[in-house]
């Protein structure tokens, strides 16, 4: 099962998040992972991910998959964090040390390294979740539990974001 849209932009290696035609990830895609740790990129996302990207440890036991331009911006921000603060060093290590470049093969598959699958608890079923400038990869059971929890708290969460103009 999959739904959502992966918008295709221009010059994927030069991303400007102010450009209204740039790639934006939305939707939810339920896919299987093969015995070698590969997933098949959904058809709607193949052109957007044709040049590859970077996958790394994410938050909430997920993985983050970003296009290279967006990854470079995040990596620069992480690199600019103050070295004299332990939390900054720890978070930068968490994100950067786990990162690896990925590129789809001719069949539209890409390999998720074992250490990242273990971190996220991904075995056979994975859910790709579009979150604007990144895809999150979740173990199916973890995603379903998380999504149910957030759905139950949606109004509370919306109210807490009132000051952000949403």
Image (spheres, grey):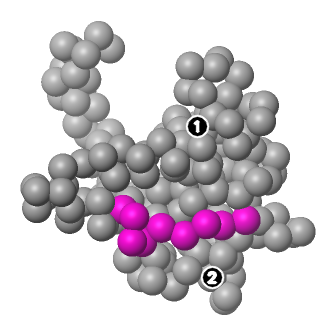
* Magenta residue check for 102: yes
Residue 95, by quadrant, is: bottom left
**Which disc is residue 64 wearing?**
none
Pick out the residue farthest to the bottom. 35
Q: Residue at x 77, y 65 (%)?
A: 104
Is 86 situated left or right of 25 in this image?
A: left
Q: Residue at x 66, y 76 (%)?
A: 111
**Which disc is residue 37 wearing?**
2
Q: Residue at x 81, y 64 (%)?
A: 108
Check contact, mark 2 vs mark 1: CB within 8 A. Answer: no
Where residue 70 appears, as percent x and y from the top left, is 54, 43
* Magenta residue check for 42: no
Mark before the other along the chain sequence, 2 or 1: 1
Pick out the residue farthest to the right. 106
Measure the C-alpha gap from mark 2 to mark 1: 24 Å
Is 12 situated left or right of 159 in this image?
A: right
Vertically, is 100 above or below 27? below
The N terminus: image quadrant: bottom right
Vertically, is 77 above or below 124? above
Neighbours of disc 2 within 10 Å: few (<14), some (14-19), many (20+): some
Where residue 97 appears, as percent x and y from the top left, is 39, 71
Where residue 143 appears, as percent x and y from the top left, is 41, 58
For label 1, the residue is 26
Q: Nearer the viewer, residue 122 or 1?
A: 122
* Residue 51 in view, yes or no: yes
Badge 2 marks a residue whose secondary structure is: loop
Q: How many marks?
A: 2
Which residues lie in the magenta part? 95-103
């Amino acid at each position: 099962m999959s739904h959502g849209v992966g918008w295709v932009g221009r010059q994927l290696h030069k991303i400007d998040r102010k450009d209204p035609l740039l790639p934006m990830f939305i939707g939810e895609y339920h896919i299987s992972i093969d015995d070698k740790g590969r997933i098949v990129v959904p058809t709607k996302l193949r052109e957007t991910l044709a040049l590859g990207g970077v996958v790394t440890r994410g938050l909430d036991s997920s993985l983050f998959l970003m296009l290279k331009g967006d990854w470079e911006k995040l990596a620069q921000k992480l690199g600019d964090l103050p070295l004299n603060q332990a939390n900054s060093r720890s978070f930068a290590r968490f994100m950067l040390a786990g990162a690896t470049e990925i590129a789809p093969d001719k069949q539209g598959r890409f390999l998720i390294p074992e250490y990242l699958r273990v971190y996220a608890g991904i075995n056979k079923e994975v859910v790709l979740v579009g979150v604007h400038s990144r895809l999150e990869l979740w173990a199916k059971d973890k995603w379903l539990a998380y999504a149910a929890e957030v759905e139950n708290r949606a109004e509370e969460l919306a109210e807490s974001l009132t000051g952000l103009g949403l």
